[in-house]
Image (cartoon, grey):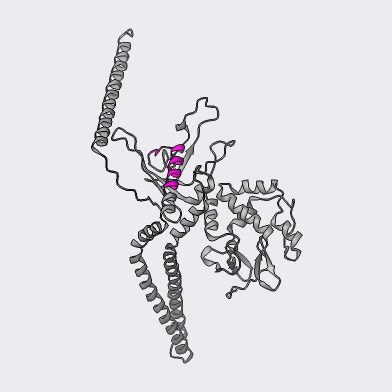
Amino acid sequence: MEKGLRCSGSVPYGYRRDPEDKQHLIVDEEAAAVVRRIFQMVIEGKGVQAIARTLTEDKILIPAAYAQQHYPENHHSHGYYDPCLWSSTAVSYILEKQEYMGHTVLGKTICENYKTKKRRKAKPEELMIFRDTHEAIVDEETWQLAHRLKRTIRKPSYPDRPSNPLTGLLYCADCGCKMTHRQPSPTKKKVYDADDAYLCGGYRHLTRDCTMHFIKTSTVETLILTAIREVSAYVREDEKEFIRIVRDAASAGQEQTAREQKKRLRQVEKRIGELDELIRKLYEGNATGKIPDKHFNRLLAEYDTEQSVLEQEAAELKEGITAQAEDGMRAQRFVSLVRRYTSFDELTAPMLNEFIEKVIVHEADKSTGDRRQKVDIYFNFIGCFVPPKPEVILTAEEEAKAQKALAARNREREQNKLRMRRVREAQRAAKEAGKASLPTG
């Protein structure tokens, strides 16, 4: 297993064994097309239950039935009720398999007790992953995106309405809670645009104290589509400049971190080597009788514990250094994503999920009399990127026109305040007159 050799007779759905090498897997195009379709449906915003219903309606063979029909030697199922009845569990298993990225994953279960033979599911850090051992069915970006979307719970406000693709992407800037979707009631006769909106999930919560952070769904969709259009236009206009800006922004805060991580990695690896030498000498001292068994067992346990901790830290440091090295490729991945789209006329669910990582919504500011609300849009691969725009210099005539419009707006605001003050005073006077007309005694 440590060499990456497969020790299980089962073959993941979408692959078949190479006749010339049983340790090597080759793609089964018929089943692989179903796997790619499942990942694509997740990116389109469908849940595992909806995917299972779609595959069942299309009469697609489930993995067990497909293996029994095409590869009976690899069929290990105990039976099934309907060869085309897909379950959400089967779809979830397919979405969880890292083998579709071309990796071999071993050690999925661990035996906790060799007497009872009881096994448990291995934790992610306990898995033995050997990268790029066979042809991938989906690329790593698609797998990671589908894996993230699968964890997003999208419950529709009403059973007869589909969930909104924006759900799970919007977050409150103050408390960090996910924004909840509010829709108008089906029985409401007159529906306004503001009835379809998002609110902070921590608003009016028993254990949290946050404000509403109200924002209309149509406003969010317009902002996201505009941001995608502007960034994509900038990328197509000057790819090299875009890549340079993204890389400079990423490397600005990472150079110091990378140096510290590399320095710490050298220290950890040096200490691991010292522990190896100490353990070797410890065994020699015990074998020659210079170190008693009591001290030998205590020191060996201490060295083993320290070495295990250092090895784990070294693995994490290497992952961090590798991730920083891959950051330079993030801009290129975003450029490739932009090239795949020829039109940005309409915001679709696949476009939303492929471009947008998250949207941070701030509370609206009404201190100036106008409602202004800040919204930060984070893209996949490049984060919160705003294309540089040339500074607009107004002419004297345009400046005077803007000042005139501002003065007119301020006058209108003051008139509205005066009018509302008069209305309240009239209401207060009418209320007092009503109280005075009531009989006393």
The residue at 71%/71% (across/down) is: 19
Report x, y in % for residue 6: 63, 71
Nearer the observer, 50 or 430: 50
With 87 as the anchor, is 176 left or right in this view?
Answer: left
Q: Is residue 19 above or below residue 179?
A: below
Q: Residue at x 44, y 82 (%)?
A: 276
Residue 431 sits in quarter: top left
Q: Nearer the viewer, residue 413 or 161?
A: 413
Magenta stretch holds residue 285: no
**Can residue 10 be seen here?**
no
Q: Position of residue 181 (x, y in %)?
A: 48, 39
Q: In which quadrant will I find the C terminus?
A: top left
Q: Which residues are magenta?
A: 211-230
Q: Nearer the viewer, residue 73 or 344?
A: 344
To which quarter of the image does residue 179 belong? top left
Q: How many marks?
A: 0
